[in-house]
Image (tube, rainbow, N blue to C red):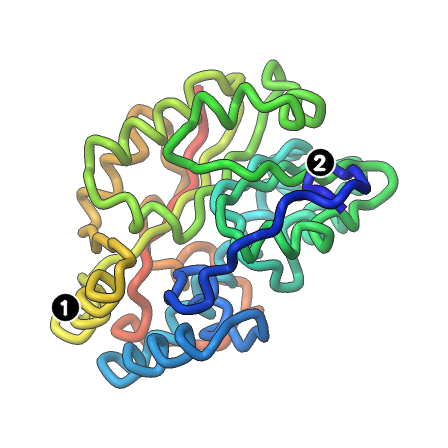
Amino acid sequence: MRPDGGTQAGPPVDLRTDTPHSARIYDYLLGGKDHFPVDREAAERMLLDWPSLRTSAVQSRAFMHRAARYLAAEQGVRQFLDIGTGIPTEPNLHQIVQSVAPESRVVYVDNDPMVLVHARALFASAPEGRTVYVHADMRDPAGILKDRQLAGALDLDRPVALSVIAVMQFVTDDAEARHIVEQLTEPLAPGSFLAMSMVTADPDPEPILRVVREYNARGIPVRARDRARVEQLFGGLQLLDPGVVPVHHWRPDGSAPDAADAEVAMYCGIARKR
């Protein structure tokens, strides 16, 4: 099946199994099965640098779960745009929001070839709603927003929850990162939301920065940002309480294991477009 829901086979997908990939490393850290020896070797090297890396990844995923449920259940959002989807790991965003409101519509966006291969798993939408996958690069916000599949699934004149979870660290230039966020949020209707998280070295700089250097040495550019720089990326949007905080401190509900502050290298926040 093609990512647009067709049945015709697309061109062969080069999974680049000889090169580590951030999505597959993340999958390995979360206990998934969609990775290759090169990804496992990279992850294990990073775990030697900072053994809490797996804990941080688990807490990041738990924030996504809470954010999705909060936006669907407490803010009444019924349209979701998820940038940098990653390899499907249940529960996925559409499963969470459609368990709250089956009519919810979800558009996933990623440019990773492994995610493309697994796109079919993202189409298991509740019959009342809709779930589609757009194969695109977050560095091309205009292209994403003009995509015909997105246009067929989301009404941008109504509120949308934009989810940019654990991917902005791969945009190392602050100006480019701000541009991406601004371009993605500009056409969204008032009352839309931005949920965003990214890597920081603030909790334990020395070992976390060793992990960052390991990513970069393996051809995966990563930038760790402090709290002030993360706050700047929310621009003029209205941050909701508790503001920009480590992911395990954003409205915890007891669903994730406890973690010490020094074990979590991710800041997050949710903001509303006025």
> Residue pushed farthest left?
206
Q: In the picture, which quadrant includes the C terminus?
A: top left
Residue occupying image coordinates x 59% and y 18%: 156
Inspect this view and state whether residue 270 appears: yes
- Which mark, by number, is residue 205? 1
Q: Nearer the viewer, residue 267 or 53?
A: 53
Inspect this view and state whether residue 69 appears: no
Residue type beneath disc 1: Pro
The part of the image, by quadrant, that contains residue 224 is bottom left
200 to the left or right of 192: left
> Residue pushed farthest right?
127
Disc 1/disc 2 C-alpha distance (Å): 43 Å
Could you tell which of marks 1 and 2 lies nearer the N-terminus? Answer: 2
Residue type beneath disc 2: Asp
Query: Residue 118's spot in the image, x, y percent?
Result: 65, 56
Element under disc 1? helix
Graded by Cα atoms within 10 Å as few (under 14), some (14 to 19) or many (20 or more), the crowding at tag 1 reads: some
Q: Nearer the viewer, residue 16 or 42?
A: 16
Residue occupying image coordinates x 31% and y 74%: 263
Give the number of the mark in front: 1 or 2: 2
Query: Residue 29's spot in the image, x, y percent?
Result: 45, 74
166 to the left or right of 253: left
Residue placed under numbered mark 2 in the picture? 4
> Residue pushed farthest front?
11
Query: Residue 136's spot in the image, x, y percent?
Result: 50, 36
Residue occupying image coordinates x 25% and y 74%: 262
Q: Measured along the vertical axis of the image, is residue 127 above or below residue 246?
A: above
The part of the image, by quadrant, that contains residue 212 is bottom left
127 to the left or right of 260: right
